[in-house]
Image (cartoon, helix red, strand yellow):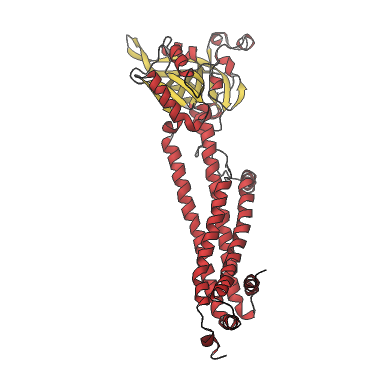
C-alpha cells in the first residue's frame, strides 16, 4: 500500500477537534450518493417510458404507413401490396381503412377512430395487446352459436372490436349492440344530407395498455368497414412492418421510390416525431439538472479538503522535512478526495440499481400504502411506471462522477503541496 494512501485514510478518521471536518466529509459522501442514485433511477425511468411508449405505439400502429395523397383512397391496393412486399426489409403488410366517427350506446355518445382491418394479414403487422373478451376472428363472421343468443333484429349485424376503456366509459359488454354514426359520405335524402348510421355487435374487448387507444380506437373488419363507408373495394392505405425499426426510414424511402406519385410512405419516427423528440429532450434536461447534485457534493469535497489542509499544516511540513515531495503531498489529498467520491459513487450506484430494477414493485407498494395512483391512466399515456436500466448510462454516470471528484481535489492538494515547511514550523 502506498504510504500516501495510508496517510489519506488516517486523515479520514477525525479527532475530537476535527469533528466538523468529518461532518462535511460525510455530507459530501451523502451528496454524491444521492446524485448518483437519482441519476440512475431517473434515467432508467426515462428509458423505460421511451421503450414502453414505443412498444405500445408500434403495437397498434405499424412501422410504415403508405397512403394516397390526393384522393385518400387506394383502389388497386392488392397490386400495391405486391410491390411493397418485394422491397428489401419489409416483413409483412396489411390494408387498412381509417375514419373518424361517433358511437352511440344507451349510456351516451362519444367520438371514436374507426379502423378497418384484414383479420388474415393484420396479426402479422399490428399487435392489439390482450384480448380480454371475445375474438378478433368474429369481426368477419359471428359464430352461429352466438347469433342464436342475440335478439332476432341483431342476428345479421357485423362485429366491432372496442378497447377496455371505451367499454367501461360507454357501459358496453360483450355482444351488446352499438350504433356508429359517420359524417363522411353522408346519404342524400329529401331532408338533405344525413350522416351514415349502422348498428354493430361488440364481438371483442382488447387492452393495449395505452389509454388513448383503449378509449378511442375501435376496429371493424375490412369488408364491413368498406360496406359501411360505401368505399367499394378501396382502402385508406397499407400498414407495413419491417425487420429493423431503426431502418424504417430507409425502407420507407425505397417504398416511396418504387411506388412514386401519388403515394406517400411515412415511417413511425415521422408519425410520432414530436413525442419522441420531447422524451429525448426531457431526458437530457433531467440529466443536467440532477448532475448539479453531484457538483454541489464536489464543492463540499473542496471545502472539506481545504479545511483538512489548514488543520494539517504541521503534518505536511514534517513530511516535507522528512523528504516527501510536492507530488507525494498532492497524492495524499487527491486520494482522500477520491475515497470520498468512490464511496459515494459505489453506494449510490448500488442504491440506484436496486431501486431501478425493482421500481414496479416499489411503486405498487407505495400505491397500496398511500392508496393513490402514481400514473392515472386517464391522465398519462401509460398506466404503469416503467423502468429500463441502460448500463451504458450507468457507466457514464460513474465515470463522470469520479472525474468530477478528481477535479475537485486538484486545487486543495496543489495548495498543500506549495506549503513551505519552515514557515509552517516557525511558531511550533
The quadrant of the picture occupied by the C terminus is bottom right
Rendering quarter of residue 237: top left
Task: Say how many tags the image has.
Answer: 0
Which is nearer the eye, 281 or 131? 281
Work out whether residue 375 can be spotted.
no
Q: Is residue 210 left or right of residue 76?
A: right
The quadrant of the picture occupied by the N terminus is bottom right
Which is nearer the eye, 67 or 260? 260
Residue 203, image x, y percentages: 57, 18
Residue 245, image x, y percentages: 50, 31
Residue drawn at (60%, 73%), measured in percent from left and top? 22
Residue 172, image x, y percentages: 55, 24
Q: Is residue 345 above or below residue 209?
A: below
Residue drawn at (65%, 44%), measured in percent from left and top? 361
Direction bottom: furthest residue: 427
Which is nearer the eye, 408 or 13? 408
Work out whether residue 220 can be spotted.
yes
Q: Is residue 193 above or below residue 362?
A: above
Residue 408, image x, y percentages: 51, 66
Amino acid at each position: 500500500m502506498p504510504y500516501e494512501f495510508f496517510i489519506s485514510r488516517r486523515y479520514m478518521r477525525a479527532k475530537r477537534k476535527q469533528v466538523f471536518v468529518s461532518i462535511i466529509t460525510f455530507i459530501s459522501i451523502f451528496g454524491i450518493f444521492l446524485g448518483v442514485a437519482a441519476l440512475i433511477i431517473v434515467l432508467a425511468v426515462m428509458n423505460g417510458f421511451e421503450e414502453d411508449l414505443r412498444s405500445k405505439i408500434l403495437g397498434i400502429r405499424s412501422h410504415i404507413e403508405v397512403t394516397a395523397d390526393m384522393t385518400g383512397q387506394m383502389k388497386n391496393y392488392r397490386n400495391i401490396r405486391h410491390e411493397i412486399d418485394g422491397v428489401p426489409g419489409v416483413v409483412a403488410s396489411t390494408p387498412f381503412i381509417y375514419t373518424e366517427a361517433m358511437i352511440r350506446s344507451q349510456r351516451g355518445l362519444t367520438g371514436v377512430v374507426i379502423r378497418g382491418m384484414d383479420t388474415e394479414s393484420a396479426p402479422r403487422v399490428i399487435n392489439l395487446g390482450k384480448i380480454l373478451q371475445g375474438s378478433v376472428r368474429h369481426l368477419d363472421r359471428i359464430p352461429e352459436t352466438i347469433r342464436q343468443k342475440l335478439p332476432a333484429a341483431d342476428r345479421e349485424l357485423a362485429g366491432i372490436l372496442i378497447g377496455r376503456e371505451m367499454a367501461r366509459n360507454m357501459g358496453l359488454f360483450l355482444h351488446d349492440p352499438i350504433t356508429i354514426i359517420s359524417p363522411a359520405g353522408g346519404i342524400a335524402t329529401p331532408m338533405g344530407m344525413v350522416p351514415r348510421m349502422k348498428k354493430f355487435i361488440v364481438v371483442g374487448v382488447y387492452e393495449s395498455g395505452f389509454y388513448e387507444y383503449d378509449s378511442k380506437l375501435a376496429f371493424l373488419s375490412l369488408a364491413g368497414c368498406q360496406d359501411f363507408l360505401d368505399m367499394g373495394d378501396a382502402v385508406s392505405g397499407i400498414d407495413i412492418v419491417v425487420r429493423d425499426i431503426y431502418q424504417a426510414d430507409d425502407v420507407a424511402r425505397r417504398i416511396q421510390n418504387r411506388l412514386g406519385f401519388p403515394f406517400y410512405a411515412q415511417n413511425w419516427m415521422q408519425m410520432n416525431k414530436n413525442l419522441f423528440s420531447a422524451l429525448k429532450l426531457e431526458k437530457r434536461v433531467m440529466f443536467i439538472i440532477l448532475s448539479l447534485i453531484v457538483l454541489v457534493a464536489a464543492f463540499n469535497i473542496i471545502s472539506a479538503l481545504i479545511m483538512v489542509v489548514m488543520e494539517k499544516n504541521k503534518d505536511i511540513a514534517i513530511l516535507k522535512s522528512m523528504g516527501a515531495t510536492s507530488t507525494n503531498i498532492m497524492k495524499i489529498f487527491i486520494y482522500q478526495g477520491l475515497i470520498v467520491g468512490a464511496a459515494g459513487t459505489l453506494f449510490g450506484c448500488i442504491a440506484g440499481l436496486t431501486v431501478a430494477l425493482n421500481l414496479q414493485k416499489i411503486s405498487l407498494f407505495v400505491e397500496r400504502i398511500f392508496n393513490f395512483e402514481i400514473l392515472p391512466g386517464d391522465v398519462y399515456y401509460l398506466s404503469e411506471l416503467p423502468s429500463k436500466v441502460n448500463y451504458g448510462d450507468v457507466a457514464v454516470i460513474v465515470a463522470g462522477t469520479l472525474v468530477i471528484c478528481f477535479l475537485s481535489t486538484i486545487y486543495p492538494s496543489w495548495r498543500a503541496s506549495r506549503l513551505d515547511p519552515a514557515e509552517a514550523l516557525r511558531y511550533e
